[in-house]
Image (tube, rainbow, N blue to C red):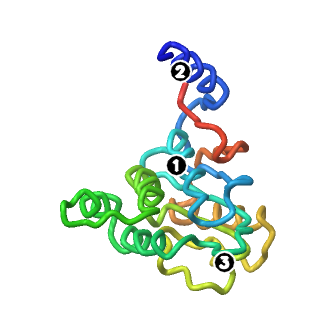
């Protein structure tokens, strides 16, 4: 049975892994069909880690179609606010404390923390048109809507890239588009 599981793992790994030549300064990804809310887009953020340079930038676009809540449950928002207010290191320290009561949905915030071990919180730019006009202070990262009034995804991404170029002194930046979003895992070959 173990050999069968290992063979299945190797087969799936062959489908899911995508080689990239090198880590990029800017990675652009999307939430795919699974990215119905902020909670679910953690999958795209986590998947992008292998393509990102240390302290690079991630731009994530999504279409939040969740009829219940476009961010996630109250429990998710509670733990997410801790991450947004502190750091990935602080969040993990608190979650591993013997005094921390387990909160359902905290594991997804731990996925976000893995991303923020590689890039600073303010190097994550997110965009979903459904967030327009919404208070996003409890979300880690920067709402890319701040750089473009348009709701066209491509214009928001271009405006965000220009903002990053300004932050980086207009130097040439390597940009990677992860067309498979959360459905593939990039790795440097």
Q: Which mark is residue 131?
A: 3
The front one of 124 and 17 is 17
- Measuring from the top left, give residue 26's x and y in whole percent: 58, 51
How far is mark 3 from mark 1, CA to CA?
A: 21 Å
For mark 3, does the 10 Å Cα neighbourhood hold few (<14), some (14 to 19), or many (20 or more) residues? some
How far is mark 1 from mark 2, CA to CA?
A: 24 Å
Name the residue that disc number 2 marks: 5
- Pointer 1 and pointer 2: residues touching (CB < 8 Å)? no
The residue drawn where x is 54% and y is 48% is: 25
* Image position of 57 with respect to 156: above or below: above
Q: Quadrant of the C terminus?
A: top right
- Measuring from the top left, give residue 89's x and y in whole percent: 29, 58
First in sequence, mark 1 or 2: give its number.
2
Please state if 39 lies on the left or on the right of 70 as rendered.
left
First in sequence, mark 3 or 2: give its number.
2
The residue drawn where x is 33% and y is 63% is: 102
Please state if 119 lies on the left or on the right of 187 as rendered.
left
Please state if 65 lies on the left or on the right of 69 as rendered.
right
Which residue lies most toward the top here? 3
As helix, strand or loop, the secondary structure at mark 3 comes to: helix
């Amino acid at each position: 049975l173990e050999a069968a599981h290992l063979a299945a793992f190797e087969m799936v790994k062959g489908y899911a892994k995508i080689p990239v030549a090198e880590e990029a300064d800017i990675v652009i990804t999307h939430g795919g069909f699974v990215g119905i809310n902020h909670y679910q887009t953690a999958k795209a953020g986590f998947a992008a880690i292998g393509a990102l340079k240390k302290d690079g930038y991630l731009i994530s676009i999504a279409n939040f179609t969740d009829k219940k809540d476009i961010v996630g449950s109250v429990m998710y928002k509670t733990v997410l606010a801790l991450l947004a207010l502190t750091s990935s290191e602080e969040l993990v320290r608190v979650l591993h404390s013997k005094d921390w009561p387990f909160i359902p949905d905290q594991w997804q915030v731990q996925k976000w923390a893995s991303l923020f071990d590689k890039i600073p919180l303010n190097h994550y730019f997110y965009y979903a048109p459904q967030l327009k006009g919404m208070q996003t202070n409890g979300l880690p990262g920067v709402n890319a809507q701040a750089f473009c009034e348009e709701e066209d995804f491509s214009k928001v991404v271009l405006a965000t890239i220009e903002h990053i170029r300004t932050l980086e002194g207009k130097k040439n930046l390597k940009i990677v588009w992860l067309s498979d979003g959360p459905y593939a895992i990039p790795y440097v070959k």
